[in-house]
Amino acid sequence: MDRNALKNQANVVIIGGGFGGLYTAQDLKNASVQVTLVDKRNFHLFQPLLYQVATGVLSPADISSPLRLVLRQHKNTKVLLDHAIDLDPEKKEVILDNHEPIPYDILVLATGVSHHYFGNDHWEPLAPGLKTIEDAIEIRRRIFMAFEAAEKETDPVKRQAWLTFVIVGGGPTGVEMAGAIAEIAHGALAGDFRSVDPKEAKILLIEGLDRVLPPYPPELSAKAADDLRHLGVTVQTQSMVTDINDHVVTVRQGEQIKQITSRTILWAAGVKASRMGKVLAERTGVALDRAGRVVVEPDLSIPGYSDIFVIGDLANFPHQGERPLPGIAPVAMQQAAYVAKLIKKRLQGESLPSFVYDDYGNMAVIGQNKAVVNLGFAKFSGFLAWFIWVWAHIYYLIEFDNKLVVMIQWGWNYFTRGRGARLITGVGEGKRKVKPQEMPQESTETPTPITR
């Protein structure tokens, strides 16, 4: 297609290169539109496997794909590395941080979510969450530095603090992290130290509700809890974290208050919408939910602005079932496909019925050969569920070389129980840490689903 011929065609601006944004751009490859994809990062991150970077199984490049490389063959698509800071819906312009405003005929917002500390943002330096590559590298540093520090510590009380790992939040991310750390302590590091036994590590998973994996059927939640305990994880349900201060976690369980001393505290308890939700509400008056997500119409647009679509984790879609759709990758991908198809239909003067999400099930991994899968009509656990989890994640990695590298790495780790990417890098304690910019990616904090 002649690039000059695109100048007079509709401008579709997509903010965010996560699952929602990238898949929208991909589905518009052959459409008669000019697509501009804006992201603060130059890569798409496969977030469902981010915890494996944080625990030394994979390297960052294994689960990341450069946006320009993915969209290289899309001659109607331009990628801008920039930060969307505002928008003018009357002028139909997006305001960027380091670029002149860009006009749009159709705007797609897919900027995802970030960590939510429920009013306790001062906990973040003490208990980092897992949403970006920087988060994963910092968590990896803290996990493996804890064992190194314990090797040198002669005071048994201080040593135990280094060997105590607390994960706050019993959703899929928390369960995956707890299981992975347990496998590190009881398997990957076996025989690597001389003064300390990694098996002495205590891994505590704290969940406020009455069971881990609350969105799953009770029998799968129970199976996941049993698998975690078998790996050496202490599961504490109906427990609320009330304070995190100076490497001490204060937990309330019923009427009891307990303090846990830990040098490694990780946060997996909640997410909030990116700031673009608030910007959109200020500029258009659209309603937000308590997490800051944008309440969208049945066609994923916003009231009064049929040219603005919100998809992925940033969207609250309340039109299907008793609850809004979960913030998971397949929801974002299906919404992206719908919006792209709707844009094509509009160019032809047509429309589409309301968006409907096809739920093919969800799954969570606990450890090697341990996972749970809910297909709705059938439920699996153990090796079969783990194999389905492995296949699904390999299948949906973006590039072929990523799939090949991850398959080889997983195969090697399966037989050797090693974690070859357990490098200690990043900024240590007591040094200034530059906080990474918020990353417009989709969240997978709710169950990792099965997609088609």
Image: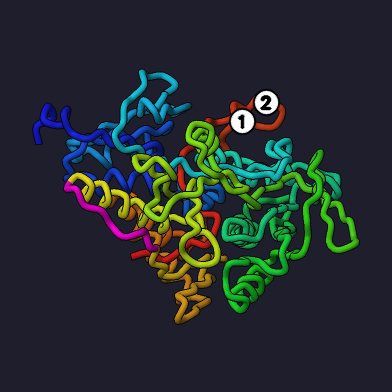
**Number of numbered tags placed on the structure image:** 2
**Magenta stretch: dominant secondary structure:** loop
Q: Amino acid at mark 2?
A: Lys
Q: Nearer the viewer, residue 226 or 314?
A: 314
Q: Is residue 219 left or right of residue 9?
A: right
Q: Identify residue for label 2.
A: 431
Residue 235 placement (x, y as % from top left): 72, 65
Q: Is residue 354 magenta?
A: yes
**Which residue reaches farthest left?**
2
Question: Which element carries disc 2, helix, strand or loop?
Answer: loop
Which residues fall within the magenta stretch?
A: 348-356
Q: Is residue 424 visible?
A: yes
| Numbered tag placed on residue 427 in the rendering | 1
Question: Which element carries disc 1, helix, strand or loop?
Answer: loop
Residue 300 placement (x, y as % from top left): 40, 50
| Numbered tag placed on residue 117 in the rendering | none
